[in-house]
Amino acid sequence: MARAAVPGRLAGRLSWQSARLVEHRDETPTARTLVLEVLDWPGHLAGQHVDIRLTADDGYQAVRSYSLAAASDHHRIEVTVQRVPDGEVSPYLVDVFSLGDTVEVRGPLGGWFVWRPTERAPVLLVAGGAGIVPLMAMVRARSAAGSRVPFRLTYSVRTPQEGYYEEELHRLQHGETGVDVTYIFTRSTPKGFARPPGRIGIRDLETPNRSPDGQPICFVCGPTGFVELVAGTLVTMGYDPGRVKTERFGPSGG
Amino acid sequence: MGMFSPGFRHRAPETDVALPPGQHLIEDFPVLSAGPTPQVSLDQWQLEITTESGQTHQWSWEELLALPQETPTVDIHCVTSWSKLNTSWRGVSLDTLLEGIETAADYALVDSYGGYTTNLPLEDLLGGQAWVVHQFEGEDLTPEHGGPARLLVPHLYFWKSAKWVRGIHLLLQDEPGFWETAGYHDYGDPWREQRYQGD
């Protein structure tokens, strides 16, 4: 596997910084995008994470890691948080955390599951559920940099109501953007959607514009079972395992 | 430090076991890895220890199982902040594997099927602190959790417990592994919260 160093990250200690909520957007009834203002944010690459720390009035602290949802934009960072039932941190961030409130953040973190706008290889993105978040950061970084590298995004969600970033993906899907967006619905589909509901399979990944030719780099993110299935299928199809990057999450991100 | 989140309260399960700083308890067992899960067949599986002088020592799957087996029950701590208590494993102590191997090395670089690497001081593999394990909670270790066999070094953050372990290189000089090259701490002691470089 290639080594991935991150510019500006390796020297010195990462310190906690104050982050103020300046905007929020509901993506679904259970997921909210938080836009945080962090004055000394050093910048980040698409795919990296940030640690968020909450402190209760008795001094108790909890830290969770979240994928950054957007490209680096000066002092602003975005995360999209899915409320985990009975979770400790996510219900607070989705339901209680209000405009003007602050938390602490530390980052950026992670240097492997990242896409750099200088890369020239075609990109295949495969997202399951909330796994869209770091992949959306890559799509947005591509647009922000004016990159014309072909991107193929396959996004699996249970129902049409559960997709994040719907309008933005709709615009990408129907514009001449070089980003191909294909949805897969596992439980129920929108009216007139040709593919019946069902989990992702080799037929979804073996389409004319998705192939291991051209040495694409693949980013697969979602729940463990989804990532195991997709990454294994891609390797079977002839994708280079060293170019299939994965990020998995379970229900314990709470 | 004076910054509180009004309305935020401790909701994690109460425990009388002290956890390392910044960790929270979980009951399930998340999977974190950087690429596809390698499929390794047992008849091709091999573990190899290479010394700094290039001497190699190999074990086939049958040879590994024929060595004295231990059943450590340990707490594990992931750098992503989850901890899991009282996990039980079965495998071979590194003391057993390294017994009789002549080396002046101070460091080890562990490599895996699939290309993952991680580094640690050799002394952290000795003294009943590390195992090559092939069972978890009485069952064969599943591929996504590192099967057929993984390293288990529970006193360090869990990324040091390389899944799909294939080889251990004994080295005179420290050589950073996969995450250690990508900004994570070289040593990774959870009790000193050594998550990232500079911690």
Image (cartoon, coloured by chain):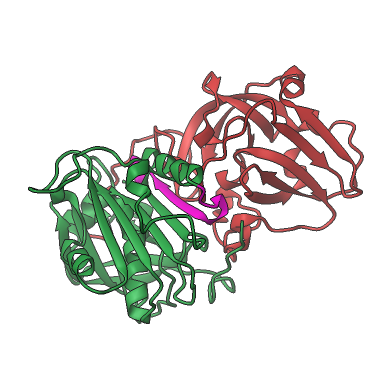
Chain colours: A green, B red
User: Relative to B29, does residue A169 appear above or below in the rendering?
Assistant: below
Image quadrant occupied by the N terminus of chain A: bottom right
The question of residue A141 being in magenta is answered with no
Q: Position of residue A157 (x, y in %)?
A: 23, 47
Residue drawn at x 24%, y 47% is: A184
From the viewer's perspective, tell me whether residue A105 is left or right of residue B94. Answer: left
User: Relative to A76, does residue B199 appear above or below in the rendering?
Assistant: above
The question of residue A248 being in magenta is answered with yes
Q: Position of residue A203 (x, y in %)?
A: 34, 43
Front in this rendered view, residue B15 or A192? A192
Q: Position of residue A218 (x, y in %)?
A: 45, 57
Residue drawn at x 65%, y 57% is: B186
Q: How many marks?
A: 0
Seen as rendered, the residue at the extreme left is A191
User: Relative to A185, does residue A154 appear above or below in the rendering?
Assistant: below
Give the residues in magenta. Answer: A238-253
From the viewer's perspective, tell me whether residue B112 is left or right of residue B36. Answer: right
